Image: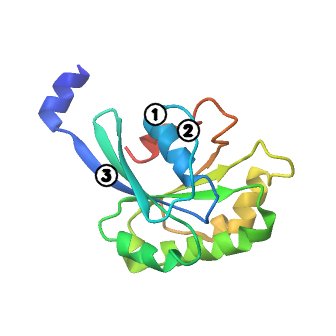
């Protein structure tokens, strides 16, 4: 039945941009989505792009480095983006305000107004990690209005599976 529906309606493609501060776990999340397992990564200078298929949707996921010198280049990836995965390191309390500023800068850009927003509260398994309600408060997520915004709690290393599938975008 699924193959028949795919033939009738065709396959969709979505462009997803994965952003967040450096060391938030973006690349680990990307390869967990792609391969279903954690892999060893190095800091991303530039970007990684992978296609992740789910049901009849192909997600072209762009994982862009989060170092402060690279962040001004993020806006060059906004055009045509249909979904944003913003990855937050819940154990990095010292930089949560910086993460909030970057998140709001992204979602307030006119090119990102239509993008679906998915917040990955990553590294929940680490000592002193912020709880989901604290992350939501610190990021100002309750102030995001008129946007399709989803939150997911996740530890890319400790959890064997993602708590969500890409259906937030499908």
Residue 45's disc is: none
Instruction: Name the residue carrying label 2.
Output: 39
* Foreground of the two, 101 or 144: 101
User: Residue at the location (44% across, 77% down)?
Assistant: 73
Q: Residue lying furthest top in this view?
A: 1
Quarter holding the C terminus? top left
Q: Which type of secondary structure does the marked residue at label 2 adopt?
A: loop
N-term mark: 3 or 2: 3
User: Residue at the location (37% across, 47% down)?
Assistant: 50
Instruction: Name the residue carrying label 3.
Output: 14
Query: How many residues crowd around disc 2 within 10 Å: few (fewer than 14), some, or many (20 or more)?
Result: some
Contact check, label 1 and label 2, Cβ < 8 Å:
yes
Instruction: Single out the mark in the foreground, 1 or 2.
Output: 2
N-term mark: 1 or 3: 3
Q: Which type of secondary structure does the marked residue at label 1 adopt?
A: helix
Instruction: Name the residue carrying label 1.
Output: 35
- 38 left or right of 50 in image: right
**Image position of 2 with respect to 155: above or below:** above
Residue 15 in which image quadrant:
bottom left
Where residue 28 sits: x, y (%)? 56, 46
Where residue 154 sits: x, y (%)? 65, 43
């Amino acid at each position: 039945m699924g193959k028949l529906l795919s033939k009738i309606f065709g396959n969709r493609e979505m462009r997803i941009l994965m952003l967040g501060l450096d060391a938030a776990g973006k690349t680990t999340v990307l390869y967990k989505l792609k391969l279903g397992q954690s892999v060893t990564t190095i800091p991303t200078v530039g970007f990684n792009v992978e296609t992740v298929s789910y049901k009849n949707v192909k997600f072209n996921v762009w994982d862009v480095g989060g170092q402060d010198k690279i962040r001004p280049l993020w806006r060059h990836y906004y055009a045509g983006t249909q979904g944003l995965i913003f990855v937050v390191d819940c154990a990095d309390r010292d930089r949560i305000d910086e993460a909030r500023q970057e998140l709001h800068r992204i979602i307030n850009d006119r090119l990102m107004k239509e993008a679906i927003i998915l917040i990955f509260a990553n590294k929940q398994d680490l000592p002193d990690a912020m709880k989901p309600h604290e992350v939501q408060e610190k990021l100002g997520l309750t102030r995001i209005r008129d946007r399709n915004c989803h939150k997911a709690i996740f530890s890319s290393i400790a959890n064997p599976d993602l708590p969500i599938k890409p259906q937030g975008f499908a």
